[in-house]
Image (cartoon, helix red, strand yellow):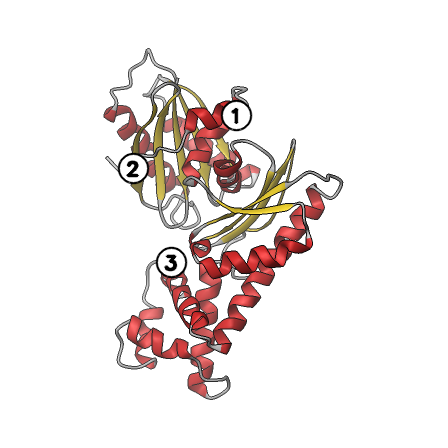
Amino acid sequence: MYILGIDGGGTKTKATLFHIEKGILWSKESAATNPHSTSFFQSVMTVTEMVEQACHAHDLREDVDLYIGLGIAGIGRTAEKNKWLSLFKEQMLHLPMIKDIHIENDGKIALYSRTYGGDGIVSICGTGALTYGVFKEQTARVGGWGHLIGSDPGSGYHLGAQVLKAVFDAEDGVGPTTYMTELMVKGESVPSLQALIPVVYEKGSEKQRIATYARYVFRAEEAGDIVAKQIVQNAVHSIVENGFHVYQTLFRETEKAIPFVLAGGIFRNDVMVRKVRKSLQQVPQLQVTRVEHDPVIGSIITILHQHGYQIEKIKRLVGHSEVGES
């Protein structure tokens, strides 16, 4: 039994081929596959190419069983999921070794990459942001509607946008001076803040570009900048508030410990992790932890979970080894 797990986001997509006895065999990264960042057709074609590469890399023929687990950002709603799957299945007709295709919310695969199929809550803060919870057969979510709807508070985009607002407010004299101005001018290799304007508005990948500016708020916060500290604290507040809402929706009646998983590039920053963990101490049941594996592993776990494998068995099968691109 082969499983091809795919984690498709608005910045990049990762595919990993797994064998039930041999473990992880192959891994590859490609372009974004969130259909709202690209298009439904382009998203499907990128994933199709990755499936073909995986089959070719290990010479998978008709007599093997291949299951595909997908977590694609931007297709959490039923109509979008059905549209994407319909296009994808049309492209897969020439690969008879594929026995089943299972698609999940990208929040669920991120959660499962840490809980191995168990219940819990995940806060994903990368370029975008989403809080997602699973309890038995129930799910709940907050956010993840995209940067044009509320800017996805807690996301890299939202933090980067707040950096821009702060430095240009300071430039206009309507806001306090901030160390982030110096960091941006130096970091973006421009002679002045105003010279950054054409860079910010340059066509193509605006969302991802602005998300990269989040790094300046963390550097300034560590240096004691008051403006940066407030931006970080506001982001933590949004993350905690969204997490608490999902907890109240799904887990209010249970007393057992609930994993609260932190995923995405924003949580590579230790300050964010510490602040979120401290703020969530008000709910003792929530056990704050970072992801253990790349979320693509969660898409493999969804297939194992679907086939009746229990958590301890899944842990032994998946293990802790991962391979690089090939």
| Secondary element at image label 3 | helix
Label located before the other in sequence (3 or 2): 2
Q: Give the CA separation, mark 3 to mark 2.
A: 21 Å
Q: Left or right of 152: which side holds 43?
A: left
Q: Does residue 152 appear in this view?
A: no
Image quarter hosting the C terminus: top left
Which residue lies under the disc numbered 3? Answer: 208
Instruction: Please state which amino acid type lies under the numbered disc 1.
Output: Glu
The amino acid at mark 2 is Lys
Badge 2: few (under 14), some or many (20 or more) residues near its Cα, within 10 Å?
A: some
The amino acid beneath tag 3 is Gln
Among the two numbered marks 1 and 2 on one chain, the one whose residue lies closer to the N terminus: 2
Where disc 2 sits, the SS reads strand
Name the residue that disc number 2 marks. 28
> Label 1, label 2: how many angstroms apart (C-alpha)?
27 Å
In this rendering, position of residue 29 left or right of residue 104: left
Residue 127 coordinates in the image, percent (x, y) = 43, 55
